[in-house]
Image: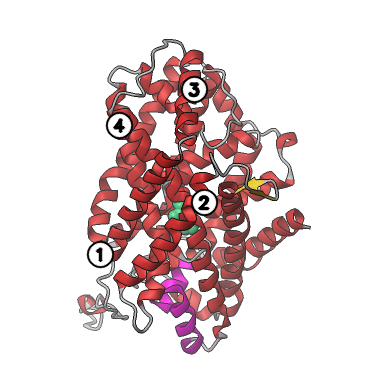
């Protein structure tokens, strides 16, 4: 018997000691990463862009983008973060010396910081809508007076339109979300967050399942909804739809702006990046599909437009809540869980920014959070006003909110993803990437092929076709 294999406990000691505590466990990392990935992107954005781009064919392209591009780039981000450590900019710099490659790739970190500012500013406004709806549910404003779907649909559309028309309500919601995000990030309470995500994400999941069951059993439109979502009609698919599907694959996985890189920096060496990424992408996709299956039957039963836009979830689900016995309580829980899911995403957008600035001489974590959070808050007011007094203010035919959404999800995230794929696929020596992915379930060669060829070629061609 060999003695050399005995002291496996010693091998557990972390190779890279940082002053951070690290995730409490593999589950801790997965919870935080799932908390980042699962958010408004799944419940608010996914259903309405599916509706706007004609259903099944869009969903198919989206799923392909997740599996063939999003998931491999997610793995690339986590591995760069873990191997490099620290903020994204630091990770690229330290890999420049340890792997003997160019340090100019730190530009990816800079693009990420810019992107984080832009994303958080409008995302926080939508998170504020969830907060307003939590308030509506608690104060009984979502009760509804009508008893049939179509009339309730009109009532709920009016409630949503009323919220958007009120700049103060939007600004208050946005402000509260930003303050909560800043408090959590400034205090670095990762443990508290893990605990919240542990309960709220499963809670959101359960309510979505209950809503799907409700939609399937009572609306009489479940078949139509399923057909809409899963029978591909490629004539509804144009170049822009493919770009939106690709962009949303990045957005929903939180990939392309180094958020996952920042989280990966705390991941212990012995944890499989492949199986973590598979779990993150899988759960994220399931939540998005459940949200669609809960929402579209109500859309059809109430005679609403699938392409109604950003209000879709806020108009449809309250129709169900108004009819289910005990619906007011379910509504309050749903919007509470959605708010927590949104917060676990907002903190993951702010974290890379704070991580970078807090590491600079003369900056503390508190100052970094305060300064960046304040700037994002100011920018977000532009998005809040885009729905009312500032609606006339447009650029390329888009208001401030739509413009920020478009530029980040459809341009900056794919661009960041493209650069990360090239970096992990070609710049880092494959000895290094193979070492990081050694414990992974997915074959290294499959990952390398997707990261080197499928992702860069796919992203570049979609970008070029849309921008020419
Ligand atoms: N993925 C989140 C959602 O779907 C949003 C999000 C969190 C995000 N962190 C991100 C998007 C980083 C892009 C980049 O709601």
Task: Report helix, strand or loop for mark 3.
Answer: helix
Left or right relative to 400: residue 322: left
Q: Mark 4 and mark 1 in contact (Cβ < 8 Å)?
A: no
Q: CA distance from mark 2 to mark 1?
A: 28 Å
**Badge 3 density bin: few <14, some 14–19, many ≥20, Cα 10 Å:** many
Task: Report helix, strand or loop for mark 4.
Answer: helix
Q: Position of residue 356 (x, y in %)?
A: 41, 74
Q: CA distance from mark 1 to mark 4?
A: 28 Å
Disc 1 or 4, which lies upstream in sequence? 1
In the rendered structure, find residue 382 and report the number of the disc placed on it: 2
Task: Report helix, strand or loop for mark 1.
Answer: helix
Q: Position of residue 358 (x, y in %)?
A: 35, 75
Task: Report helix, strand or loop for mark 2.
Answer: helix
- Magenta residue span: 77-98
In the rendered structure, find residue 332 and report the number of the disc placed on it: 4
In the rendered structure, find residue 187 and report the number of the disc placed on it: 1
Q: CA distance from mark 3 to mark 4?
A: 19 Å
450 or 311, which lies in front?
311
Q: Is residue 304 magenta?
A: no
Disc 2 or 4, which lies upstream in sequence? 4
Residue 419: quarter of image: bottom right
In the rendered structure, find residue 298 and report the number of the disc placed on it: 3
Disc 3 or 4, which lies upstream in sequence? 3
């Amino acid at each position: 018997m060999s003695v050399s294999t005995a002291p496996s406990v010693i091998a557990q000691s972390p190779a890279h000691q940082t002053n951070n505590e690290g995730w409490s466990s593999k589950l801790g990392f997965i919870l935080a990463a799932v908390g980042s990935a699962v958010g408004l992107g799944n419940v608010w954005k996914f259903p309405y862009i599916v509706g706007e781009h004609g259903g099944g064919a869009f969903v198919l392209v989206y799923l392909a983008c997740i599996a063939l591009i999003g998931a491999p780039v997610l793995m690339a981000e986590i591995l760069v973060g873990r191997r490099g450590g620290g903020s994204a900019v630091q990770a690229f710099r330290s890999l420049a010396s340890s792997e003997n490659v160019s340090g100019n790739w730190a530009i990816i970190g800079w693009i990420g910081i810019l992107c984080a500012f832009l994303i958080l500013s409008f995302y926080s406004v939508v998170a504020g809508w969830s907060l307003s709806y939590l308030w509506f549910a608690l104060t009984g404003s979502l009760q509804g007076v009508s008893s049939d779907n179509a009339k309730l649909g009109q009532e709920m559309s009016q409630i949503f339109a009323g919220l958007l028309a009120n700049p103060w309500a939007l600004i208050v919601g946005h402000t509260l979300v930003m303050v909560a995000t800043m408090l959590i990030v400034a205090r670095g309470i990762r443990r508290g967050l893990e605990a919240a995500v542990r309960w709220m994400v499963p809670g959101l999941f359960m309510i979505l399942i209950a809503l799907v069951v409700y939609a399937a059993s009572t609306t009489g439109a479940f078949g139509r909804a399923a057909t809409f979502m899963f029978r591909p009609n490629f004539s509804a698919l144009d170049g822009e739809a493919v770009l939106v599907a690709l962009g949303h694959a990045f957005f929903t996985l939180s990939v392309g702006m180094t958020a996952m890189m920042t989280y990966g920096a705390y991941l212990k060496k012995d944890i499989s990046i492949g199986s973590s990424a598979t779990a993150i992408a899988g759960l994220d996709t399931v939540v998005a599909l459940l949200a669609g299956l809960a929402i579209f039957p109500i859309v059809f039963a109430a005679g609403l437009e699938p392409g109604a836009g950003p209000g879709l979830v806020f108009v449809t689900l309250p129709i169900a809540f108004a009819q289910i016995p005990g619906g007011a309580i379910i509504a309050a829980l749903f919007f509470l869980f959605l708010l927590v899911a949104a917060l676990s995403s907002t903190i993951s957008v702010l974290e890379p920014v704070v991580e970078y600035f807090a590491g600079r001489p003369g900056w503390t974590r508190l100052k970094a959070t305060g300064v960046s959070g304040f700037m994002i808050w100011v920018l977000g007011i532009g998005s809040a006003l885009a729905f009312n007094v500032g609606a006339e203010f447009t650029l390329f035919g888009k208001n401030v909110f739509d413009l920020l959404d478009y530029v980040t999800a459809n341009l900056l995230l794919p661009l960041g993803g493209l650069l990360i794929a090239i970096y992990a696929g070609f710049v880092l020596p494959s000895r290094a990437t193979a070492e990081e992915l050694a414990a992974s379930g997915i074959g290294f060669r499959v990952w390398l092929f997707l990261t080197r060829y499928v992702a860069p070629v796919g992203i570049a061609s979609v970008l070029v076709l849309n921008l020419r």
